[in-house]
Amino acid sequence: PSAYLDRVRHDPAERDALIEELVVHDSWFFREPAAFGWLTAFARRLASTTPTTQPLRFLSIPAARGEEPYSMAAALNEAGLPANRVSIDAYDVSLPAIDEARTGEY
């Protein structure tokens, strides 16, 4: 184990391979419907108490291929929040998933 740990620390390709083995690659649009219901209710309350000049910032982690942050944007838009009022940051540790998300093709 210590030799493998040393290898992971010093070999980026091995680290990336380990990450790909450990991460869950499940990602789809509106994966947890109840979470999106909570998100829109929370965003509406937040918008009612935040100056309109201040964007509402949300974080999506892990973002995988992008379906979750895209779903967040769609849900917030459906809730009546204009795009210029919302900022969504999305992160993931899987480089292949991020590359796929960058294409924006689903």
Image: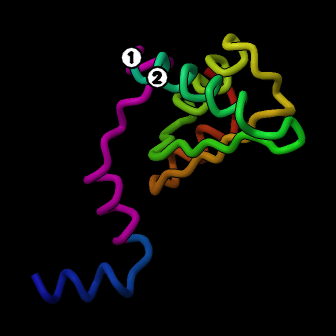
Asked which secondary structure carries label 2, the reply is helix
Camera-nearest residue between 17 and 42: 42
Q: Residue 1: give x, y in percent of width and height.
A: 10, 81
Q: Nearer the viewer, residue 29 or 4?
A: 29
The residue that label 2 is drawn on is 38
Pick the front one: 11 or 36:
36
What residue appears at the point 42 percent right and 29 percent down from the top-left corner?
27
Magenta region includes residue 28? yes
Q: Determine whether, in the image, residue 10 is placed left or right of residue 76.
A: left
Q: Say which quarter of the image contains residue 28.
A: top left
Rendered position, 15 above or below 73: below
* Residue 16 painted magenta: yes
Task: Tell me the amino acid under the disc marked 1.
Answer: Ala
Where does the magenta region start and end?
A: 14-33
Spatial CA span between label 1 and label 2:
6 Å
Q: Nearer the viewer, mark 1 or mark 2?
A: 2
User: Is 87 left or right of 25, judged from the image as shown?
Assistant: right
Q: Name the residue: 59% across, 26% down.
A: 72
Q: Please state which amino acid type lies under the numbered disc 2.
A: Trp
| Position in image of residue 18 (x %, y %) | 29, 63
Residue at 31 percent across and 49 percent down: it is 23
Quadrant of the drawing holding the C terminus: top right
Residue name at image x 38 percent, y 20 percent? 32
Q: Residues within 10 Å of mark 2 (few under 14, many from 20)?
A: few
**Badge 1 density bin: few <14, some 14–19, many ≥20, Cα 10 Å:** few
Q: Secondary structure at mark 1?
A: helix
Against 73, residue 8 (above or below) is below
Q: Confirm or deny contact between disc 1 and disc 2 (CB under 8 A).
A: yes
Tell how many labels. 2
On the image, numbered disc 1 is attached to which residue?
34
Left or right: 102, with 10 as reference point:
right
The image quadrant that residue 6 belongs to is bottom left
